[in-house]
Image (cartoon, rainbow, N blue to C red):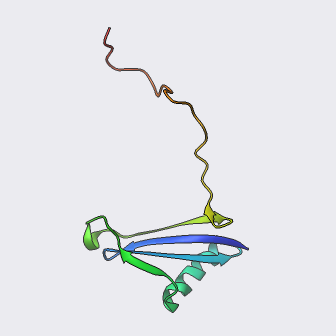
Amino acid sequence: MKQYRFQCYAAGLYFTSVVNAADDEKAIEGFASNLNQGLYSVKEDGFGRGKRRYHITYEELDNGTAKVNIGETSAGVSMGSASVSAG
């Protein structure tokens, strides 16, 4: 069994809910069920865009925390060639 966190922005509100499911498809069904049963938290979205913002995201959680792999890098890593050089 996996744990998923769903986040939904709609009508100027932010909804979030955690679902336990065997796979992604069952998690989506579980999120819909949670919405129907009122098993979510909701607050204003805080983006000031009112009712124009609509989207849903979900992520698999690992022991209650999101799985994120941003890798490691050191400070001052070059990201390409400079277009202007102060020589």
Question: Image quadrant of residue 18?
Answer: bottom right
Q: Residue reaching furthest bottom?
A: 37
Q: Nearer the viewer, residue 77 or 30?
A: 77
Image coordinates of residue 3 in percent, x first then y, are 65, 71
* Image height of 8 relative to 30, above or below: above
Image coordinates of residue 66 in percent, x first then y, are 60, 61
* Image height of 40 relative to 14, above or below: below
Q: Residue at x 60, y 82 (%)?
A: 30
Judged left or right of residue 38, residue 30 is: right
Quarter of the figure that contains the C terminus:
top left
Q: Which of 26 and 59 is in front in this view?
A: 59
Q: Residue at x 51, y 30 (%)?
A: 75
Q: Residue reaching furthest top?
A: 87
Image coordinates of residue 29 in percent, x first then y, are 59, 81
Question: Image quadrant of residue 43?
Answer: bottom left
* Image height of 9 relative to 86, above or below: below
Image coordinates of residue 72 in percent, x first then y, are 60, 38
Q: Which residue is drawn at 49% across and 82% down?
A: 40
Q: Residue at x 48, y 70 (%)?
A: 7
Judged left or right of residue 7, residue 73 is: right
Question: Image quadrant of residue 73?
Answer: top right
Q: What is the number of callouts on the image?
A: 0
Quarter of the figure that contains the N terminus:
bottom right
